[in-house]
Amino acid sequence: MAVAGGGSTKRLQRGTLSQGLIVATALRILDEDGPDALTFQRLGKELSSSATAVYRHFASRDHIMVAVAEEIDRLCLEGYEPHESWTESLRDLAIRAWNTAMEHPAAAALCMGRVTRGLHELRAVDAVLEAFHRGGWRGRAAVLHYQAFSNFALAMASNNAWRLVNQRFGAEVNWVQEYQPTDPATYPYAEAAKEHLRSLDMTDVFHRQMDILLTALQAEAATLPRD
């Protein structure tokens, strides 16, 4: 059997191509060459198979992306265990999403936040809901907080993933906040902070945003009635 990417032209034996192998190969293509590189033709080539064989497992590129999204969810949760503190559970889940998006930015940019209805997505939903349940939220309030927290964390991670993709694959995008006004005195606060604006690290921003959010959630939790 040919190894994907190994340069062999030998075809996979009939029955050896699987959805799992296709998804793993799709993720590698995205990692190496970015969003535009993922096509059925490229998958067939990398798998020493054919585009038609890939179509037998996935009817469209969108179906592949849903499966990749499920794989991203699996990677995010790999080894996760709830913490004694519900806020640390939320922090851990958010950090896992951020780190996975850093490791697989093209896949995260395309997939993170989309609904898969898969097992690993359900595991993530349940983990976040468990943390909010332990914090004291119930029913609709727990679901609202779950959705708000998840949207916030995933938006930060996927937005940073797009930034990394644009930087790596040559888009004409400048992500550095650098300003050179004609009259700097007109913008005294931006002028005083210009060195920090220029050198800001987005991971530091992410951690600060999580600190702010979790502090607010702790304050709200202290006002909730206890069972």
Image (spheres, rainbow, N blue to C red):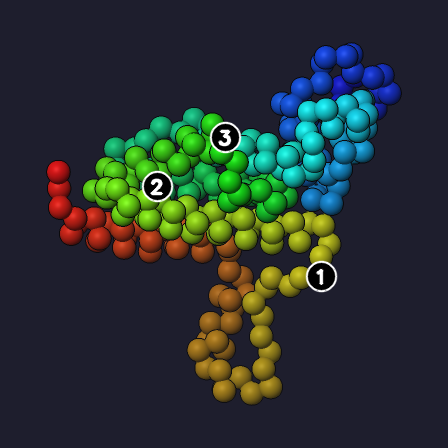
Residue at left offset 64%, top offset 27%? 24
Q: Name the residue under label 1.
A: 172
Q: Which of 227 and 58 is in front in this view?
A: 58
Q: Can residue 139 be seen in this view?
A: yes
**Residue 46 position in % (x across, y down):** 78, 27
Q: Name the residue under label 2.
A: 90
Q: Which residue lies furthest to the right in this view?
A: 9
Q: Nearer the viewer, mark 3 or mark 2?
A: 3
Q: Is residue 198 above or below residue 154?
A: below
**Residue 3 position in % (x across, y down):** 76, 19
Q: Can residue 105 be seen in this view?
A: no
Q: Nearer the viewer, residue 4 or 112?
A: 112
Classify residue 103 by image quadrant.
top right
Which numbered disc flags the more N-terminal residue, 1 or 3?
A: 3
* Residues at marks 3 and 2, CA–CA distance in whole angstroms: 21 Å
Number of residues whose C-alpha sits closer than 10 Å to that of mark 2, classed few (under 14), some (14–19) or many (20 or more): many
CB of mark 3 within 8 Å of CB of mark 2?
no
Q: In this view, does 1 lie above or below 95?
A: above
